[in-house]
Amino acid sequence: MSEKKKTDIFYKLAAKYAEFYKGKVEVVPKVPIRKLLDFAIWYTPGVAEPSRIIAKDPELSFEMSGRWNTIAVVSDGTRVLGLGNIGPEGAYPVMEGKALIFRYLGGVDAVPLTVRARDPEKMLELLELIEPAFGGINLEDIESPKCFYVLEEARKRLQIPVWHDDQQGTATVTMAGLLGALDVVGKKLSEIRIVLFGAGAANIAFYRLLKIGGADLKKVSVLDSKGVLHPGRPDIEKLKETNPWKYNIAVETEGGGVVGGPEEAFKGADVVIAASKPGPGTIKKEWVASMADNAIVFAEANPVPEIWPWEAKEAGAKIVATGRSDFPNQVNNSLAFPAIFRGVLDVRARTVTDDMAYAAAEEMYRFAKEKGLSEDYIIPRMDEWEVFPRVAVATALKAIEMGVARRKASRDELYQHATEIIKRSQDMTKKLMELGFIKPLPE
């Protein structure tokens, strides 16, 4: 069966099931209701007492309400993966799917919140207004370069973790995969020449992680649709105003010593990380053939990677990763965001930093190394659920180390709690299916 036919089947089933289930997540009670009189405790008059206590010390909202485990998945629908600008209503099913993954893989209660706040300042005002209701914010599918500004400003203004998954999630999992791939081919991050093919949300965030990991920035070439970012580009002054993130990369890397386009950038490169437009043919075989020995190629576009894995291998790549589950070495955000939020929520963190993301990537790499790295296994698989509590702990411990955690706990305490809450969520889903509260899939 062709890749297009497989994808078309998934489209058809998704539409059919969306109409049947009318949503992917729902709110259920977590307290016992033995008789209607119990509402005198859970609601009025009893609820007045915890409300009075929290009013005196709002920080107690993390201890006496569900805020500690509840996040908002916020999107304006301007850059939905593979669909583009489809608006907030169109984006809602995607955010619901995200909420489902948060719950099943992280034990996190996530609320889809698609909004019409397209202006960056309106979006930031909205995030500030809803902050008291949530323990964290997951930004999703917001167009570039607006997404960079919103994330940076939200991190400054809010006292809860704000995460943009298209930036930080993709970057974290990519870094984990790259650490594994470099281990397999016997190369060091500080010595290799790297090409970032695409200068959007994912690769700009990945660039920040390369800096934390100790990459030689003068050996990093970042390409956008006009070629390598470097200080001599004709549009460099315009970039300074319109996209300072690209401008800073151009200045810091000096183009990695390269001027031109992909053909020039790929020559002799050890690693290519592509997060650009879907292929096939976006990356040419001859470009890959010009890379260094034991080359590593990440082609992360969905639904079709920039180059098919077998073509990259035929051209000489030693290790290939994509964003798809039907090929080896899937780079999937879902490996990162449920566990990272599990970690930051468990220590009531005030933010989530790039250093915390890098710590999460290192833990994924360690997990895969313990399992046994190979050319076709450089990163944990989605069905290896044991990786999620480990990544949660690594994230939480880094938050404590950096002084951004409201709550401190030991490694063992954090691991036990993360394991219990994730397993509980998965067991609950299975039990609801067994009992028929979640209906079987229609024929």
Image: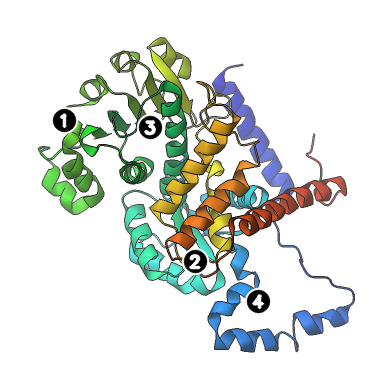
Kindly identify the residue that appears in the image at 25 percent across and 36 percent down.
216
Kindly identify the residue that appears in the image at 18 percent across and 47 percent down.
239
- The amino acid on which the numbered mark 3 sits, given as a three-letter code, is Lys
Q: Is residue 375 above or below residue 19?
A: above
Callout 3 environment at 10 Å: few (<14), some (14 to 19), or many (20+)? some
Q: Give the secondary structure at mark 4.
A: helix
Sequence-wise, which precedes: disc 3 or disc 1?
A: 1
Sequence-wise, which precedes: disc 4 or disc 3?
A: 4
Sequence-wise, which precedes: disc 4 or disc 1?
A: 4
Q: Quickly name the residue at label 4.
A: 64
- The amino acid on which the numbered mark 1 sits, given as a three-letter code, is Gly
Q: Percent position (x, y) of residue 376? A: 53, 22
* Residue 262 in sight here: yes
Between marks 3 and 1 in the image, the one whose residue lies nearer the viewer: 1
Mark 4 to mark 3: distance in Å?
46 Å
Kindly identify the residue that appears in the image at 39 percent across and 64 percent down.
154
Between marks 2 and 1 in the image, the one whose residue lies nearer the viewer: 2
Callout 1 environment at 10 Å: few (<14), some (14 to 19), or many (20+)? few
Q: Quickly name the residue at label 2.
A: 405
Q: Percent position (x, y) of residue 434? A: 86, 45
Q: Which mark is residue 277?
A: 3
Q: Quickly name the residue at label 1.
A: 257
Between marks 4 and 2 in the image, the one whose residue lies nearer the viewer: 2
| Marks 4,1: beta carbons within 8 A | no
| Front position in the image: 85 or 224 | 224
Callout 4 environment at 10 Å: few (<14), some (14 to 19), or many (20+)? few
Mark 4 to mark 1: distance in Å?
56 Å
| Marks 3,1: beta carbons within 8 A | no
Sequence-wise, which precedes: disc 2 or disc 1?
A: 1
Q: Is residue 253 above or below residue 35?
A: above
